[in-house]
Image (cartoon, rainbow, N blue to C red):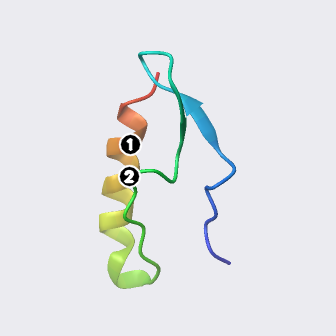
Amino acid sequence: VANDLSNLTATDKKQWELNLTRGIAYRHGLEWHDENAKNMKGLLNDFK
C-alpha cells in the first residue's frame, strides 16, 4: 500500500495550510526508506 499523503494538510509556522505532498520526493522501496524518513522529518520540522 502506497503512503498517500495527498489528503493531508498541515499548518506551518506562518499559518499557511500546506499540502504535505508538496516538496516531498517520496520514493517507494526499502532502498529509499532512510531518505524518505529524512525528508519526512525535515518536512515535519517545518510544522508546529
| 38 relative position to 15: left or right | left
**Residue 17 percent location from the top left of the image:** 56, 28
Q: Residue at x 45, y 50 (%)?
A: 22
Q: To which quarter of the image does residue 24 belong?
A: bottom left
Mark pair 1, 2: CA separation: 9 Å
Amino acid type indicated by mark 2: Gly
Q: Secondary structure at mark 1?
A: helix
Q: Residue at x 62, y 74 (%)?
A: 2
Q: Is residue 26 above or below residue 21?
A: below
**Residue 36 percent location from the top left of the image:** 37, 64
How many residues crowd around disc 2 within 10 Å: few (fewer than 14), some, or many (20 or more)? few
Q: To which quarter of the image does residue 43 belong?
A: top left
The disc label shown at residue 10, or none? none
Q: To which quarter of the image does residue 8 belong?
A: top right
Amino acid type indicated by mark 1: Leu
The disc label shown at residue 23, or none? 2
Residue that badge 1 annotates:
43
Q: Is residue 11 above or below residue 34?
A: above
Q: Nearer the viewer, residue 10 or 42?
A: 10
Quarter of the N terminus within the rendering? bottom right
How many residues crowd around disc 1 within 10 Å: few (fewer than 14), some, or many (20 or more)? some
Q: Are marks 1 and 2 in contact (CB under 8 Å)?
A: yes
